[in-house]
Each structure stands twice: as C-alpha cells, then as structure tokens.
C-alpha cells in the first residue's frame, strides 16, 4: 500500500516544480506552492461534484457532512488523549463522515421522511455528539482551530497525494456517470424506469461528496467547506445554457477563486480558505448581475 501511495510522488513533484517555476515572489515559498497545487486539484473537483450537489439540492447534505467532522475530530483527539497513538483526527473525521453520509442516504431511501428532515436529524446528532465528547472528557486536549478555519498553508505531502488522487477519482467518476447522474437529477423515477441503478449512484455520489468535504476541510475548515461545492456550481447555473456548460464554468470559477483567493491571502495576510470563498462569492454576485441584465 505504501509503494502504491508513493507512485503519486512523481506527479506531485512535477506539480510542485511547475509552481516553483512561476515568476512571482510568493512562488519561492514551499507552503505557497503546496497550497496552490492542492487548490488547483481540489477546487475544480469540488466544483464538478458541486454541479450535482446543486442539481440534487444537496447543499444541506454537504453541510451536515462538514459538521459531522466536529464529532470525528473530537473522537480522534479523545483517542490520542487516551494513549491511542494510532489515532489521527483526520482519519476519524473521515470515518465518522462516511458513516453519517451513508446513514443519511440509507434512511432517506428506506423511509418517506423528507430529505431535509433526515439531514436535520443527522446534523443535530453529530453536533451533539461532538459537544458531549468535548465537555464530558477531562482529558480532552484537542485544538479545533485548524479544523474550524482550515490550515492550507500547513499542508504536507500526504495532503497533496490525497488531493491529486481525489481529483482523478472525481473526474473519472463524472465522466463515467455523467448521463446517469443527469437523468437522476432530472427525474429519479424516470431514471429507475430506464434501468439506471439509482441506489448504487446515490451511495456512490454520497461517498464522493464525503471524500471531497473531508479533504476540503484542510483548505477552508468546517465552517466554510460547503462553499467549495456550492458557490462555483451556483455561479455556473446562472451563466450556463446547458448541463455540459455548467461543468466547465463551475471548474473555471473554482480555478479563478483558488488562484486569486490564495494570492489575496498572501498579500493581505488573511485566512486562505476564507479568501478563496470570498472571491468565489464575488464571482457569483457578478454572474447574478449578468443574469439580471440579460433578463431586461
């Protein structure tokens, strides 16, 4: 497994070398180059998945997954405090998020409860669980700041490997399932009548969203990670004239937000994740203005 993991190193090294070759002052800093590579990988990947998050009306779902990280991180820190050195808050974050994502999808499919109701219950439960872990454990010593606000400038090689691998997985998944997901987004029952395995795609897409959200937390933190999925896709929905255009426009908006947000955070010395989201929001406002002018 370790050897397989390291096969990504040549690509990671090539991307870092390309970033360092840029003729800018900030490119001499390794942390900026690592941040740029991570943003260029995860930004468009989140935007492409975000197109279906918007079309499926799953923004609340991604928000619930993000907040499940609260319980996951708390569990990781608690295990570390108990002497379990194998525990890593990033790993427990992923495990709890996967459990919550699959549970939401399962309950939604097996009951006649509204999607927002199921997500609301899960959302409340994971927040409550995280608070219970923190307040009832005298040995809890976790620092949540990096997870609440993101710490993209402290990314390591493993984070870059995850970014590259996850971007490749998302792109391949979208290419493979584009038509089927589009049909499901249009009409779930129609997709089922066309022998589309809607259950499989529901679980697969939920898993993709979970992986992107947990990876994106390293960039923007728990509080803002949903924006990486929703904001570029919302911008694309205002401007695109077809479903295919939404992917290209969303990806372009994510790339612009990533680069300009990273540069803004460097020059004005502010949080990178927040700067990326604010730039993306400005693009959304601009696209909204264009849409309103076109309707006159």
Image: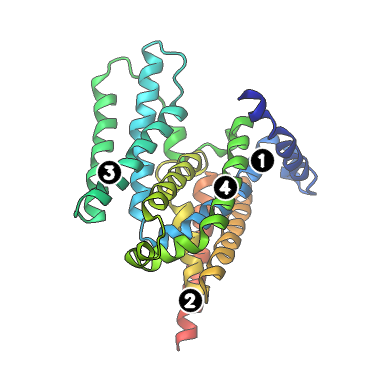
Task: Categorize mark 1 by other alpha carbons within 10 Å: few (<14), some (14-19), many (20+).
Answer: many
Colouring mode (rainbow / by chain / secondary structure / one colour): rainbow
Numbered-mark total: 4
Residue underneath mark 3: 123
On screen, residue 291 above or below 105: below
Taking the spot 45% from the left edge, 86% from the top edge, the residue there is 295
- On the image, the x and y values in percent for residue 204 come to 44, 47
Residue underneath mark 2: 289
Residue underneath mark 1: 32
Foreground residue among 177 and 230: 177
| Quadrant of res 13 | top right
Q: Is residue 144 among the parts visible in the rendering? A: no
Taking the spot 41% from the left edge, 13% from the top edge, the residue there is 84
Which structural element holds mark 3?
Answer: helix
| Circles 1 and 3: CB atoms closer than 8 Å | no
Residue underneath mark 4: 42
| Quadrant of res 253 | bottom right
Taking the spot 36% from the left edge, 56% from the top edge, the residue there is 58
- On the image, the x and y values in percent for residue 213 come to 45, 44
On screen, residue 113 above or below 82: below
Task: Categorize mark 3 by other alpha carbons within 10 Å: few (<14), some (14-19), many (20+).
Answer: many
| Quadrant of res 244 | bottom right
Which structural element holds mark 2?
Answer: helix
Which structural element holds mark 1?
Answer: helix
On screen, residue 172 above or below 188: above
Q: Mark 4, mark 1: which one is toward the viewer?
A: 4
- On the image, the x and y values in percent for residue 291 come to 48, 78
- On the image, the x and y values in percent for residue 259 come to 63, 53
């Amino acid at each position: 497994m370790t050897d397989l993991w390291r096969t990504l190193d040549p690509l990671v090294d090539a991307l870092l070398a390309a970033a360092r070759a840029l003729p800018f002052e900030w490119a001499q800093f390794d942390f900026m180059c690592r941040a740029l590579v991570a943003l260029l990988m995860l930004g468009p990947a989140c935007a492409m998945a975000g197109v279906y998050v918007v079309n499926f009306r799953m923004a609340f779902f991604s928000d619930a997954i993000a907040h499940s990280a609260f319980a996951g991180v708390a569990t990781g820190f608690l295990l570390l405090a108990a002497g379990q050195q194998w525990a890593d808050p990033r790993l427990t974050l992923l495990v709890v998020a996967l459990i919550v994502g699959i549970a939401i999808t399962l309950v939604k499919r097996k009951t006649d409860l509204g999607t927002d109701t199921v997500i609301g219950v899960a959302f409340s439960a994971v927040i409550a669980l995280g608070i219970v872990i923190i307040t009832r454990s005298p040995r809890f010593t976790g620092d949540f700041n990096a997870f609440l606000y993101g710490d993209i400038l402290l990314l390591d090689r493993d984070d870059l490997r995850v970014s590259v691998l996850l971007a490749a997985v998302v792109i391949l998944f979208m290419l493979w399932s584009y038509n089927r997901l589009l049909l499901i987004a249009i009409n779930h029952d129609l997709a089922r009548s066309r022998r589309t395995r809607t259950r499989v795609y529901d679980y697969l897409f939920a898993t993709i969203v979970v992986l992107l959200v947990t990876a994106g937390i390293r960039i923007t933190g728990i509080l803002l990670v949903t924006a990486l999925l929703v904001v570029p896709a919302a911008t694309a929905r205002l401007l695109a004239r077809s479903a295919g255009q939404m992917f290209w426009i969303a990806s372009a908006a994510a790339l612009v937000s990533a680069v300009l947000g990273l540069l803004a955070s460097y020059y004005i010395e502010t949080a990178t994740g927040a700067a990326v989201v604010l730039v993306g929001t400005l693009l959304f406002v601009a696209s909204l203005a264009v849409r309103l002018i076109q309707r006159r």
